[in-house]
Amino acid sequence: MDDHVVGLESVSRHYGDAIAVADVSLGVERGELICLLGPSGCGKTTTLRMVAGFVEPTSGAVQINGQDMTGQPPYRRDTGMVFQSYALFPHMTVAENIAFGLENLNWTRADRDQRVSEMLKLVELPHLAARLPSQLSGGQQQRVALARALAMRPAVLLLDEPFSNLDAQLRVRMREELREVIRSVDVTTLFVTHDQEEALTMSDRIVVMNRGRIEQIGTPGDIYERPESAFVAQFIGWCSMLEGVVDQEGAFISKSGLRLPGKWKAGPGSAVIRPEHILLSADGAAGLSREGRVVESHYYGGATRIILDVNGEQLMMQERFPFGRHPKPGEKLNVTLKMDEIRVIGSASPCSADRQVLEGEQPRNPSKR
């Protein structure tokens, strides 16, 4: 992995009998923003901390700019890190926080002041240079922490859940600003989150982790539209997942008998159907038409999310209805499944159609979308 800015080679980390990270290999290209995504306890933060040098791998190697950094302390790794809590020094001003690392490297006062000024302009906070962290909002503290990390011009920027302490609206605005700053300085970035939306909107590539292992690596489009496992399909976005089998004709047949015609590989599998793959038949979409009975209906302002019983299977769809029109449980709707969007993933080998279908478990809490 000598041609990558960051290279992980079969990295593992054990804590006694507990395995936090298991045989992770990853190469990060120059200028890429890579997201480590997964549920709590999946190993993403441990992986990030092994790159930073705060945790040593039990086995495997960590490379930065082609150099083996295994065993090297954090200050020798040419990385800058923004912690979940921001970790600003409370007794120092904004300017002093940003200058802290430069002072430890014995930069002259004039050079430090110039770099601090550059960083404050970059994060649009020059008017707050003399304030203490306690006098800043959460979003301002996050930008100061980012400026401090970038002041050293690190080869790699490491971000550990940097938006977790922000409210929902500020989080959306800050991730847009952060992405813009990262692009402007062209710094290679590793970013840890459990938030799917953050990963999909910010990343060049996403590394989905589960139980210490990598489930799939790909672009946001690959991860969402072409999941390679049931875990990835269910963890990324909303979906309905149907267990069943593909017959010799290539059609998927669910356990309840719902038949989805296609050209998938024969054998057991799971059909994945996203909400946008199901439309009201009146919309004129081509595909498989079926009648469904409304089981649940939830209004979210921009759209209504509906759980339909179709041939004994519960499928999730999302539709914008005219004002005052809100389907009620028990009501029947004619819907069309967009078969060219459906994916079937198999237990033995991936099944392929022109595109693919995603399934999901019972709908998760929409607030955790």
Image (spheres, rainbow, N blue to C red):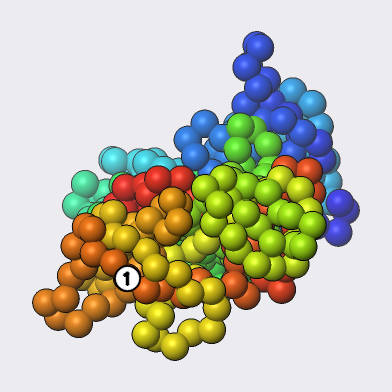
Quarter of image, res 146: bottom left
Residue projecting furthest to the right: 2
Q: What is the three-letter code of the residue carrying label 1?
A: Leu
Query: At x 52% / y 31%, what residue is drawn?
Result: 41
Q: Position of residue 60 (x, y in %)?
A: 81, 32
The answer to whether residue 35 is left or right of residue 100 is right
Residue projecting furthest to the left: 324
Q: Secondary structure at mark 1?
A: strand
Residue 207's place in the image compared with 13, above or below, is below
The answer to whether residue 351 is left or right of residue 284 is right
Q: Which residue is mark 1?
A: 333
Query: At x 78% / y 43%, what residue is drawn?
Result: 348
Q: Position of residue 249 (x, y in %)?
A: 77, 62
Q: Position of residue 7 (x, y in %)?
A: 78, 48
Question: Residue 186 or 212: which is nearer the viewer?
Answer: 212
Quarter of image, res 290: bottom left
Residue projecting furthest to the bottom: 284
Quadrant containing the C terminus is: bottom left
The answer to whether residue 313 is left or right of residue 343 is left
- Visible residue check, residue 162: no
Question: Residue 10 or 318: which is nearer the viewer?
Answer: 318
- Visible residue check, residue 262: yes
Residue 132's place in the image compared with 205, above or below, is above
The answer to whether residue 294 is left or right of residue 238 is left
Query: At x 41% / y 73%, what residue is drawn?
Result: 335
Query: At x 54% / y 56%, what residue is drawn?
Result: 258
